[in-house]
Amino acid sequence: MSTAATINIQNIATELKQWRFGQGRPQPELIYPKSVFESRPDRNLSLKSLKLRKLLQYGEQNFGINLIYSRDTEPATERAVRRWFLARPGDQARPVAFGEKVALANGRGDSFLRYSRREFGINLAWSKEPVYEWKILGGATGQPVRTGKDVAIFNMNVDGTGGPDGDFLIHLDRSVGCDIGWTTSPSWLDTLTRLAGVVIRDNSWRAAVLAALSV
C-alpha cells in the first residue's frame, strides 16, 4: 500500500487545478457570491476546463447531466456562457474564499449542482435549492478567490473514496455524457499513478493533496 510520504503530492495537486472561473475578464477580479441567477449579472462567470481549453456550459444530453463543452473560447462565446455563479448562505457582501463551503450553480430554475448517483455519466444532479457541498481550492484557506486563477473544484459529498470524504471534479473521457468525472473513476487510475510516481492502491494521497491545495 502506498503512503502519502512516497507519493509525489505536488504533481497531483497541480494536475487537479483544472478549472478557471471568469476566463474573459481582462484583469483578475474578486469573485462574489449571489443566491439566485436573476440578481447581479455582474457576478456571473464562465468556467473553463484547462485540460480541454473549452468552456463548460449547460447543454442537453441524451445521457447524463445536461452539461456540455463549448466549441471554442472566443470572446462572444465566453460572454454567452457566463451563467455560472457561486452561492453562500447569508452574507453576500464579502468575496468567496478558498476552502469555504459554497453552492455551485448555472443559469435559472434548478440551478444548483449536487452529488447524486445516476446510471450514466458523472454522479451529479440539478437542485432548485442551493446545496453547500463544494469548495474552491488552490489558494490559502480564507483568502479570496479571483477570476483567471487555476483552481481545483472539490465536492464534499462524493462517497466511496476510501479516504477523506469528497472528491475532485476533473476532465474525464466518457463514452456517454459530458466528459467530466471524479478521481475515483477507474479510468483515472493510470493518470494518478503516473503523476504520483508510484502505483496507487488506495486513497492515502487524498488528505495530503487537500492540504497542499490549501496553502
Image (tube, rainbow, N blue to C red):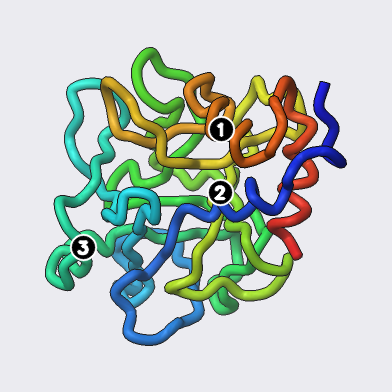
Q: On the rendered structure, is 164 left or right of 117? A: right
Assess disc 3: are there few (<14), some (14-19) or many (≥20) residues with their C-alpha within 10 Å of its C-alpha: some
Q: On the rendered structure, is 76 left or right of 10? A: left
Mark-to-mark CA distance, 3 and 2: 21 Å
Image height check: is 108 above or below 38? above
Name which of mark 2 and mark 1 comes first in the sequence. Answer: 2
Q: Which residue lies furthest to the bottom in this view?
A: 27
Name which of mark 1 and mark 3 comes first in the sequence. Answer: 3
Asked if the residue at tag 2 contacts the one at tag 3, i.e. Cβ–Cβ closer than 8 Å, the answer is: no
Res 129 → quadrant: top left
Name which of mark 3 and mark 2 comes first in the sequence. Answer: 2
Assess disc 1: are there few (<14), some (14-19) or many (≥20) residues with their C-alpha within 10 Å of its C-alpha: many
Spot occupied by residue 149 in the image (x, y as percentages of width and height): 49, 70
Mark-to-mark CA distance, 2 and 1: 9 Å
Q: Dot 1: what SS? A: loop
> Mark 1 = which residue?
183
Res 145 → quadrant: bottom right
Q: Residue at x 28, y 21 (%)?
A: 175
Q: Residue at x 28, y 46 (%)?
A: 109
Asked if the residue at tag 1 contacts the one at tag 2, i.e. Cβ–Cβ closer than 8 Å, the answer is: yes
> Mark 3 = which residue?
73
> Mark 2 = which residue?
16
Tell me the kind of residue under disc 3. Answer: Thr
Assess disc 2: are there few (<14), some (14-19) or many (≥20) residues with their C-alpha within 10 Å of its C-alpha: many
Spot occupied by residue 54 in the image (x, y as percentages of width and height): 27, 54
Spot occupied by residue 23 in the image (x, y as percentages of width and height): 34, 70
